[in-house]
Image: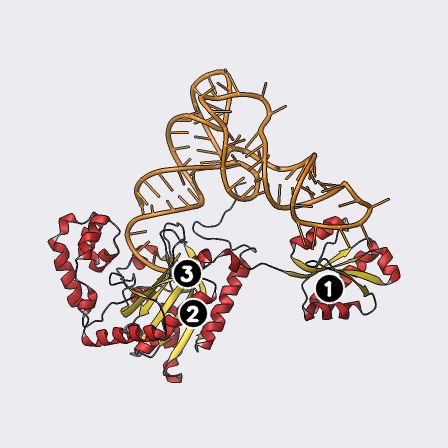
Amino acid sequence: MEKITVIKGFKDILPEDTPDWCRVELIARQIFGSFGFREIRVPIMEKTELFKRSIGETTDIVEKEMYTFADRDEELLTLRPEATASIIRAYIEHNMLSAEPVTRLFTMGPMFRRERPQKGRFRQFHQIDVELFGDDKPQSDVEVILMLIHFLESTGLSELALEINSLGCKACRPAFSQAVVNYLKGSEKELCPDCQRRITTNPLRVFDCKVESCSSIIARAPRILDYLCTGCEEHFAEVKSYLDDLNVQYAINPTMVRGLDYYVRTAFEVKSGSLGAQNSLAGGGRYDGLIGDLGGPEVAGIGFGVGIERLLACLPDTEKSKYKTDLFIAALGQRAQKIGFMLACQLRRAGIAAAMDYSDKSLKSQMKRADKLNSSYTLIFGDKEIDEKRLELRNMNTKNQQVLLLDNLLDTLINIIKER
RNA sequence: GUGGGUGUAGCUCAGUUGGUUAGAGUGCCGGGUUGUGGCCCCGGAGGCCGAGGGUUCAAGUCCCUUCACUCACCCCA
């Protein structure tokens, strides 16, 4: 019989890795909470139209990466390739603007893009996603960027590179795009085939090209920052100024253009080495027109997404978490096994991680098991201890052993373990 | 979608110019201590050598096909 395997680009997250996931998610919840963000959970499937309208019909995501299916009634549904669209949909649908002028939300969960997998890129991957609706002030940009950096550092990451840029707005970007097109047409023949194609499809993408011959041309191309309108320029200046005051290190990357159509003004990205070609752990930006475009109120928005797999891939080993056991019960013989089992059940019910082996193996074998399970203590007893009503409790780290009386054993153990 | 690399034990990988019964490390189980873990020593289990076809007296090894994984491009978290 042929083995059934996981879908290409999908991954099982195995027990040895889940503690890291839980830790990162916990830190996110704590830190985002202190910045006033509240968790929202939205479906992983939406009507296809939502993503087409938000992300942009001509983006790679919509053109070739979405998992889209016809439902039984022929309606087209899509597994979400990102979370922002769904959150905006929910924001509009539940009329959150009426409840409060500024809404701070975050969510976490799987996203789906049907790309060719490689290091740091999967077809199902996980993001922690943050959105702030209803404020267009630069303070919002700074708040969100600061929170992102603070979060990443709190997980144990270091040597992060924050890059920021301004993409202009509806008023000033068209002039810039035109200037880029004009410039590129001047040296079209020296560009790589991909970039020649981009001139007509998506000229700003040329800035991302890694081909060397293109780089030198791009280096002399017009800069978005020279084309910003007064409003965008002032906004960007304030963002930089606050970041400086807060001692947040950043670099301005005037060639950073993000892949989704809806971004305006501030765009940012956090990179890390040691990640292979996909070195971007988090990215985001401002999308002031988007909520209105999706049929909601004309309010501003800004947000970011963090790739959890990429974050975990960068974590140093010292930050890795493990499963731990409070007490291993090493019971020798039938009577001890019986007492031990009852004890294990009661301890577990009291919230203590108690483990034991039910097959009455040798003590050595049971000790090895206790060690494997990272047990803090091991309770050791057989017929002799039961007759004398005195059991041995071994501290696995110090190797000290103390005698515990069989009477009131459950409470004694609970106290010892909880006092640690 | 395009290109490169790799498929041998649960995991990481050796395996010579084709040549008998396919190896190591690690992990797992057991023993060395008749009742005490990590280190050390000994033993054991565990392989349709990715799949299918071909060449050959003989294929893990050579050829073809196919599948999977992986890295990179495009693009992105």
Front tag of 2 and 1: 2
* Mark 3 vs mark 1: in front: 1
For label 2, the SS is helix
Q: Which residue is mark 1?
A: A345
Q: CA distance from mark 2 to mark 1?
A: 41 Å
Q: Residues within 10 Å of mark 2 (few under 14, many from 20)?
A: some
Residue A418 vertical position relative to residue A9 in the rendered view, above or below? below
The one nearer the camera, B49 or A29, is A29
Element at label 1: helix
To which residue does mark 2 refer?
A150
Q: Position of residue A335 (x, y in %)?
A: 84, 57
Say if residue A141 shows up in the picture.
no
Q: Which residue is mark 3?
A: A111
Subunit under mark 1: A
Residue A134: x and y, percent? 34, 79
Asked if badge 3 and badge 1 are on a common chain, one would say yes
